[in-house]
Every structure is written in structure tokens, then in C-alpha cells.
Amino acid sequence: MNNYSYEALYKFTKDLLLKIGCPETDAETASKVLLSADLRGVDSHGVARLSGYIRLWEKGRINPKPNLKVTYETPSTAVVDGDSGLGLVVAPYAMQVAIEKAKNVGTGWVSVKNSNHYGIAGYHAMMALDQDMIGISLTNASPLVSPTFSKERMLGTNPISVAIPASEQPPFVADMATTTAANGKLEILQRKDLDAPLGWVQDATGTPTTDANGVKKGGSLLPLGGDREHGSHKGYILGSIVDILSAVLSGANYGPWAPPFVAFLEPDPNPVGEGLGHFFGAMRVDAFRPAEEFKAHMDNWITRFRKAEPAPGFDKVLIPGDPERELEAERKVSGIPLIKAVEDDLMELGEKFGIKLDN
């Protein structure tokens, strides 16, 4: 495993996106979103996904020069048409629309259709923090998840992210899949030839399995909880809410009609909407109480939870966002580690497009 600097990976990613026809500003935005995942330790959603986006572009499923536009709006809401663009570009545009609406009327809510995979949910939610706003980011995804009591793939991993500002303390940043594990984590196990923990996957018959390739063999991911006895119905409900707000509300494809991220699978020939869907929210803190007062109490909330007495075998209690923030600080200095399979993937892309990857 070799480490690469943020700057080297950013330049490689940007140059590659320029090669497929992305405008300069879009290539810069997409590279920042993608690399934010690697910096924060969400390796499954960073440069490991780059070849997947390129394959979608080669299949004509990603428009490198989308005409992003608001197709419907009220003072506090909007629908954005992503014009089949990179979700890495569409999502920041839509979140900015939500932020601008919140500036004007207190809150902003934006649903998106006709988009693609948007990277890590947390990046978009965190855009609100600098404005003393609470940010919310949701997306539906490739149908790889079976509802509780089913063996059919109906939902995506459908993540939820909420970012909340504080004052002296780092912000509270929740970023989670509504499955027991994100599909990207399964892909990492596959590359390392390791088994998956029980409760992550079921096989094609609906039987729990530890085979990390279970989904590739016709199985499915399991909702958060893993099984009914451990609350998988709650994960199923959460994933459903994300699907409805992201896609049913916007006019995107929902449930089993959501287009797959992998290019070798074709989208459903009878779609119920346009592309993938996202949902974003921005709430001005001072629409509820003075921002400094709220942030002081967030500091108090975070501090008290940090001081909660750890259970035996644990050193400390974490606040959502702590592990990612600590990894980001470390990786900015020591570089971003890439496993050999991802490194080889990037080298192959570099050869194909005439771009050199330095470390």
C-alpha cells in the first residue's frame, strides 16, 4: 500500500475529468468532492470510484457538460434537473440553491432528478456549516438492498448526512448508510479477499452469508440492523424515506428502477423517472434562536457527551464526525493510502488517457 499526496490525487482526478470534457470549474468541484472522501477515510467513495464514473461516461450515461437548472420552485423549495451530469457536480449546485433559499427565508429544501452518484453525503451537508446553517444531504442509489423479509433488491444504500455547527468544538457531522454497511466497504473486502461480517449480506436465496461477493452472485445487502431481531425493519424504513424524498418527490427513478452505478448493467428499459435523485436541506440556525447561543449549547452538548463514561474495553466516547476529522488531519500530512487494486486501477486510467499519477 502506497501513500499519495492530496495534491497529486487532486491533479490526476482533475486532469482526467478535463479529458472526458468537463469544464474547468466542474472538474475542480468534482475532484474536491471525490478527494474529500479519501481525506476523511471513506475510501470506498473516493478515487476508488473514479474508474466507475469513467465507464459510465463511456456508456453515454454521464453528461460531462450538463445544463443544470431549477425546473420548479417556491421561496423555500426547488427541484433541480441535473441533465445526467456527474452527481459530484450536480449535488453541490443543488445544495447551494438550498443555502441561498435559506438565506432568504430561513430554510431551503431542494430535490434533484436526472443525476448520478454524488460521492459522500457528508460533503454536501457540510457546505452549510460556514453559513451557520444545519445541512442535510440524502440520495438514493443502485438497488442492491432487500427490504426486511425479502430477497429481492429494491433499495440502495441510501445514505443520510446531517451537519450541525458548533462554536469552539468541531461540528457534529453524521454520515451513514441505511444499510448495515455501505456497498463500498464490501468492495474493499472483495479487493482484499476477505469475508464480510454476518449481517451485511444475504445470498440469492435470502440466506445470510459472509461471502463478500454475495451481492455479485445475485444476493443483496441487508438494511441497517441485519435482521428483524436486530431492527432491520428500521433500516428498511430509513432507506425508504431517503428514496421517497430523493426520487419520488423530484421525479427521479426510485426503488428497483434506480439506475445501477456499474456500467455493465443497463438501466431499466421502462424507467419511472429521470436518473438518480438527491435531497438537500439547509436551515439557518438564527431562524430558530441566535446562532451564537445555539452554538454555545452545541459545545456544551458535545463536551458532555465526550465526557460520558466509556464502557469496559473502550477509551472514549466519540461524537459523529470525530473519526473522519482525525483521519483528515492525519492524511493531509502523511498522504492518502491506496490499496494495490485501486492504485492499479488509477495507473490503468492514466495510461489510457495519457495522464501521469505521481505520489
Image (tube, rainbow, N blue to C red):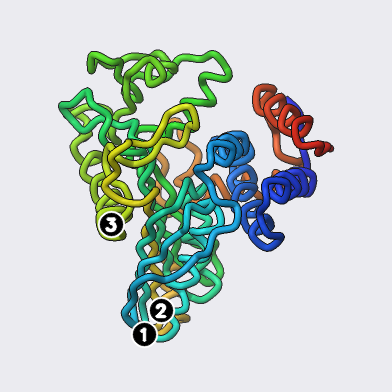
Mark-to-mark CA distance, 3 and 1: 21 Å
Q: What whole-number distance in Å separates the C-alpha atoms at marks 3 and 2?
A: 18 Å
Q: How many marks?
A: 3
Mark found first going from the N terminus, 3 or 2 = 2
The residue shown at (48%, 43%) is: 316
Mark earlier in primary sequence (3, 1): 1
How far apart, in angstroms, are the residues tagged by discs 2 and 1?
A: 5 Å
Q: Amino acid at mark 1?
A: Val
Which residue corresponds to mark 2?
102
Which of labels 3 and 1 is toward the front?
A: 3
The residue tagged with tag 1: helix, strand or loop?
A: helix
Q: Quadrant of residue 353?
A: top right
Q: Judge left or right: residue 323 versus residue 235.
A: right
x and y percent of residue 208 in the render?
A: 28, 16
The amino acid sitting under disc 2 is: Ala
Q: Is residue 284 above or below residue 299?
A: below
Residue 245 badge: 3
Q: Nearer the viewer, residue 266 or 344?
A: 266
Element at label 3: helix
Other residues around mark 1 within 10 Å, as few (<14) / some (14–19) / many (≥20):
few
Q: Which residue is mark 1?
A: 105
Q: Which residue sits at x=41%, y=19%?
A: 216
Residue 65 picture location, percent across and down: 59, 57
Question: Do tag 3 and tag 1 residues touch (Cβ < 8 Å)?
Answer: no
Residue 74 sits in quarter: bottom left
User: For the residue labelled by badge 2, is the local secondary structure a helix, a strand or a loop?
Assistant: helix
| Residue 91 x, y percent position in the rendering | 49, 59
User: Tag 3: residue type?
Assistant: Leu
- Residue 35 at least partly seen: yes
